[in-house]
Image: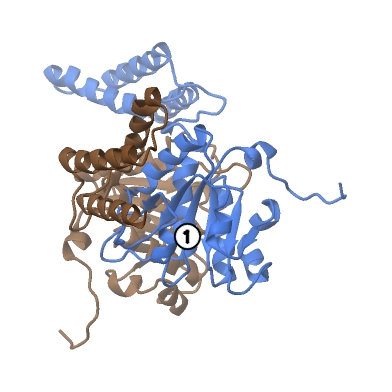
Chain colours: A brown, B blue
Amino acid sequence: MTGTNRKSLDPALVNAPQPVIVLVNPQMGENIGAAARAMLNCGLCHLRIVNPRDGWPNERANAMSSGALELMPPVEVFENLADALADCQTVYATTARPRDLVKPVLTPRFAAEDMASATQNGEKTAILFGAERAGLSNDEVAFAHKIITIPLNPGFSSLNLGQSVLLVTYEWSQIVFKAAEETLPTGKSEIATGDEFENFFTRLDQELTNARFYRVDEMKDIISRNIKSLFQRAKPTNQEINTLHGVLTALISKK
Amino acid sequence: MTGTNRKSLDPALVNAPQPVIVLVNPQMGENIGAAARAMLNCGLCHLRIVNPRDGWPNERANAMSSGALELMPPVEVFENLADALADCQTVYATTARPRDLVKPVLTPRFAAEDMASATQNGEKTAILFGAERAGLSNDEVAFAHKIITIPLNPGFSSLNLGQSVLLVTYEWSQIVFKAAEETLPTGKSEIATGDEFENFFTRLDQELTNARFYRVDEMKDIISRNIKSLFQRAKPTNQEINTLHGVLTALISKK
């Protein structure tokens, strides 16, 4: 309860069942910060770090996180992976290259659905990311139940740690912050009714007839319908219909 | 035809119909480089830049692109957005905040499907990204047919330019580099047949009976089925069944 105006996270988001992100042996603070930023962008608040090369806390991580590390609950630091996973029930390991281990390999999208199901089943889940250069060792991958591999351009697939965390957690975010595929925001106006649209189009059609736009009688219906189609495709709002009436009035009066 | 061993892109990827990425008034070379890297990770090869603050080419962009800019066809630089879009037929503008413009707003996922359809229709498409701080101006958004907004944590949604490009182009990549949702790579072995599995389980069951593991006769069937279920869930390969036979032999002989 200080007097600061510091932003804070929605407690519902912090407390919601969710995967924990586990960075194993991360080297550069910048990458830890970028990972934290990506996590919080995607609604994940719980970061664990195993054996960070430069210790913890890390100034560079704070700077790179754009405030995410300040907003999130404190990062938990562990000496080894077994301790970091002690309370976890389903563990996903992110790897770019195939391993000689018989474990299911999931796309990030399917993994997010899988985690959402596990989470709804009351399981605590974790997603592992390896160190910058070599990724997870086979011993570390062996802690996981499933593997996540991001299918990218096979000719240029290398991602940095922050980007990997962003893509995997993005898939989680698209379940949690699901938005309508397509919306048409119309502000204070509404899509014009059939009546409003017909009123405008009948007037336009009449003015075009008056102006002898339809030169060949047999073609009139076809051309008229084509013009109507163009305006239909735009699906104007009632305010836009008013604007079009004004446009028409202005053009006529100029003659 | 120099003697260098330089990696090169698959010409099929370079020439495939695909959206062009247009960065409008980008400021930092690092962000242009990160955008290029993200694009190429996701299989997009054509980058256009409108009015870059620090001119072009840009050393920092090259360094940050991890080689992407060297591999991609040369970046095209334009003085204004109209020129950059002169040959484009469907234009998507990426914006984080709502605009007072009546345009369809799409999720990145739906936008990727929409672009794929437009591309199959033979249309040239473009995706616009604005400058680092302010994003696209309303005048710039007005060039677009549709808007892309990434639904993220409303309490912490700010992305940098490279991250925005990564998420939007990732959705394109998941159409182009579509992978099976879940696979189980088994190397040289195969999932055990019913016969192989039953042979092992019958042997285990017999050894457990010999060892008087099933103390209560009425419970034997239930407990036996539960143990079988556990091994079934693991879905062992034929090699793993051999390993399990070895484990069993070792444990028996120890007695």
Query: Picture quarter containing residue A98?
Result: top right
User: What is the x, y in percent for residue A197?
Assistant: 22, 41
Residue A123 % position (x, y)? 23, 46
Q: Residue furthest left?
A: B218
The quarter in which the N terminus of chain A is drawn is: bottom left
Say if residue A149 shows up in the picture: no
x, y percentage for residue A126? 33, 51
Position of residue A251 relative to residue A104, above or below, is below
User: Eyeballing the image, is A43 above or below B20?
Assistant: below
Q: Is residue A48 left or right of residue A15?
A: right
Q: Nearer the viewer, residue B236 or A255?
A: A255
> How many dots with numbers?
1
Position of B239 compared to A83: left or right?
Answer: right
Question: Height in image: A66 above or below A236?
Answer: below
Residue A231, x across and y down, in percent: 32, 41
- Disc 1 residue crowd, few under 14, some 14–19, many 20+, Cα 10 Å: many
In the depicted view, which residue is nearer to us: A89 or B183? B183
Chain where mark 1 sits? B
Q: Residue furthest bottom?
A: A3
The reply, left or right, for residue B131 in relation to residue B80 is left
Residue A187 shows in the view: yes
Q: Which residue is mark 1?
A: B129
User: Which residue sits at x=48%, y=35%?
Assistant: B178
Residue at position x 44%, y 58% from top? B164
**SS label for mark 1:** strand
- Observer-nearest residue: B175 or B223? B175
The residue depicted at 41 percent of the width and 33 percent of the height is: B181
Residue at point 53%, 68% (across, down): B25
Q: Amino acid at mark 1?
A: Phe
Quadrant in the picture for residue B249: top left
